[in-house]
Image (cartoon, grey):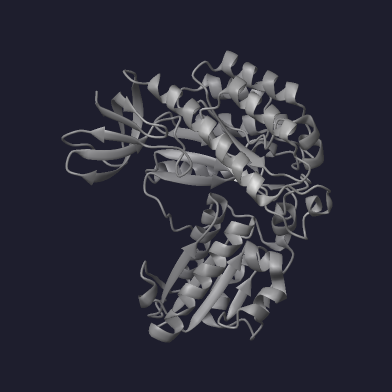
Amino acid sequence: MKNNLKVYLNSLGCVRNLVDSEIMLGDLAAGGFGLTRNADEADVIVVNTCGFIETAVEESIDAILELSEFKKTGKCRRLIVAGCLPERFREDLAASLPEVDAFLGTGAYHQILAAAQGNDNNVKCLLPAPASHPLQRAETRRIPSTSSLAYLKVAEGCDRRCTYCVIPKLRGGLRSRPIEDVAAEAKTLIDSGFKELIIIGQDTYSYGNDLRPKVSLSNLLEKIALLSNRIRLRLLYGSPDMTDDTLIRTVAKYDHVCSYFDIPIQHASPAVLKKMGRPYATDDLLKLFDNIRAAVPDAALRTTLLVGFPGETDRDFKLLLDFMQKVRFDHAGVFIYSDAEDIASHRLKNHVPKKIARQRHDALMTLQKRISLDHNRGRVGETYEVLVERQMESRLYLGRTYFQSPEVDGVTCIQSPGMKIGEFASVQITDAHEYDLKGKAA
């Protein structure tokens, strides 16, 4: 039933958060709300927040304050804040933001409709345990935010206890969806016309470890790959210790599974890895990336790194630089350590001054830019299948190859008199930049 009310949702943070936002929009639409992309038209505004690191917290607070102005200047009569920020800061956050009508933690996403309707019995903070949030199912309604790709969240939470990370507190322990249920959702997404499915979780490669009997990510990947070879499959958010030979062989086996390995290592110094609580050694990492490249010669390697961790010395950082020179990742994201009292690493000694951490970040990014440019220059003259995602102007389109994940990697700019959005096209690369490629229809 339509209620003539409109809702605007601002989704912040990672793509796992984006899936939660799409599900909340599905619940709101099923409850009669109209959806709008304009906050000034909305009767209800929802901000799905990230609270992982300091910059994400600041971005979330800024967004809340900015959107709260529509309670004065627009139609908005209810402002709801959901997700990791209220889960992390709880009643203290509510006390500091009187503009907000309701706060929903990560265990309360399924209560969004009642919160939007004002049927929450005047309880301002809904903060049940994260694991109380039911896992999505294949039949769960989602309002897609993208047209050509869809994210397939296969698990929630994380069982690791990395000392710098607050995710287990915000999301609970690992909870994997049944393999048949994930495959059913994948089929629905494929039948709906999505051309790329991106498999995600908080710790994706640990998928199935909690199921009885156990199921591996390679089992799931193969099951989805067999549904159709007319789409592209991609894995994100891996872990070195869970990247086994079976998974590598499964990626290599199917042409439509991207030869793309997103494996955050965080660091390469044994001393820093130990303090971080990461369960592998530097030699393990070198062997892993050698094995991947031997089994999948066209593999694109992406990683995430953390600099300025407490106790990180100049020698530790030099080890990381040398490691990066040796492995030569295609893509890398570099973050500066974000301290907080509710993470274990806060209690470690010898915190690195922010100025030094920033210098290390910049040095690492400068090195990675050179490496990425070398990789891209080596692709000039090659022809790749590109998923065409939008038209920028006459005869100019944007798309992505298998080695370009959305948002975090570069894009391919294509010169063509005409291309079909949401379809694959053969593109010959004509020019290369640090992140982006240029090409023409082959």
Residue plotted at (83% across, 49% down): 348
Nearest the camera: 102 or 97?
Answer: 97
Name which quarter of the figure residue 128 lies in.
Answer: bottom right
> Left or right: 350 with respect to 98?
right
- Vertical placement of 330 versus 5: above or below? above
Q: Nearer the viewer, residue 10 or 313?
A: 313
Q: Nearer the viewer, residue 183 or 362?
A: 362
Q: Position of residue 22 (x, y in %)?
A: 49, 58
In which quadrant of the rendered image does the C terminus lie? top left
Q: Is residue 51 above or below residue 180?
A: below
Q: Is residue 242 left or right of residue 426?
A: right
Left or right: residue 189 versus residue 307 is left
User: In the displayed structure, would residue 98 be above or below residue 346?
Assistant: below
Q: Residue at x 77, y 49 (%)?
A: 351
Where residue 228 sits in the image (x, y, percent)?
Answer: 44, 31
Would residue 227 be seen by someone viewing this image from the given angle? no
Locate residue 77, reporting x and y percent. 47, 84
Instruction: Indicate the position of residue 379 as horizontal and vertical percent values.
Output: 38, 21
